[in-house]
Image (spheres, grey):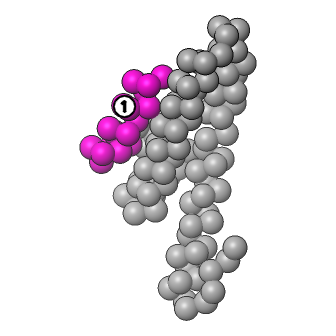
């Protein structure tokens, strides 16, 4: 898990977050070049790096049987990832639109 966390950070550092390839399955091609798409994939990749780092810590200090439920939890987070990315992108777009119009940002 430490290696996957480090690999995730390295993909962001290299400018090609690994979640970008997954996000392309859920978004139309005309969105792929937008700054918000790139920001969202960077954020999601860094969040996954934190999840992998947390999983490494949990598996290091808990009994072997915890790995099964941890794997299920990570699977469920993976299934929720597209929803989380869409939710973030929508929230962020509303804030950008409000700033462009000079309105106070939504919560």
* Relative height, residue 93 to residue 60 (above, below): below
For residue 32, what is the image quadrant?
bottom left
Question: Which residue does the image show at 64% across and 28% down from the upper left?
Answer: 74
- Look at the image and say whether residue 9 sits in the magenta stretch: yes
For residue 72, what is the image quadrant?
top right
For the C terminus, the quadrant is: bottom right
Q: How many marks?
A: 1
Please tell me whether the stretch drawn in magenta is mainly helix, strand or loop. helix
Residue lying furthest front:
61
Q: Is residue 46 visible?
A: yes
Direction from residue 54 to residue 71 in the image, left or right: right
Image coordinates for residue 92, horizontal then vertical, percent: 56, 67
Q: Which residue is mark 1?
A: 7
- Find numbered disc 1 in the image and state the secondary structure of the residue it sits on: helix
Q: Which residues are magenta?
A: 1-17
* Relative height, residue 78 to residue 30 (above, below): above
For residue 57, what is the image quadrant?
top right
* Relative height, residue 94 to residue 61 (above, below): below
Image coordinates for residue 95, horizontal then vertical, percent: 58, 75
- Look at the image and say whether residue 2 sits in the magenta stretch: yes
Image coordinates for residue 38, horizontal then vertical, percent: 41, 55
Question: Which residue does the image show at 46% across and 44% down from the upper left?
Answer: 46
* Relative height, residue 79 to residue 40 (above, below): above
Residue lying furthest left:
14
**Residue neighbourhood size for the residue with mark 1, other residues' Cα within 10 Å, grouped as few (<14), some (14–19), many (≥20):** some
Question: Which residue does the image show at 48% across and 37% down from the upper left?
Answer: 49
Q: Is residue 25 visible?
A: no
Direction from residue 48 to residue 81 in the image, left or right: right
Direction from residue 90 to residue 99 in the image, left or right: left
Question: Which residue does the image show at 53% across and 44% down from the upper left?
Answer: 47
């Amino acid at each position: 898990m430490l290696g996957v966390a480090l690999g995730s950070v390295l993909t962001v550092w290299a400018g090609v977050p690994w979640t970008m390839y997954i996000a392309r399955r859920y978004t139309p091609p005309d969105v792929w070049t937008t700054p918000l798409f790139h920001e969202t994939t960077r954020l999601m990749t860094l969040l996954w790096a934190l999840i992998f780092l947390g999983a490494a810590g949990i598996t290091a200090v808990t009994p072997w049987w915890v790995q099964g439920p941890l794997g299920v939890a990570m699977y469920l987070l993976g299934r929720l990832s597209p929803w989380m990315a869409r939710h973030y992108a929508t929230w962020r777009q509303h804030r950008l639109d409000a700033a462009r119009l000079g309105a106070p940002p939504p919560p």
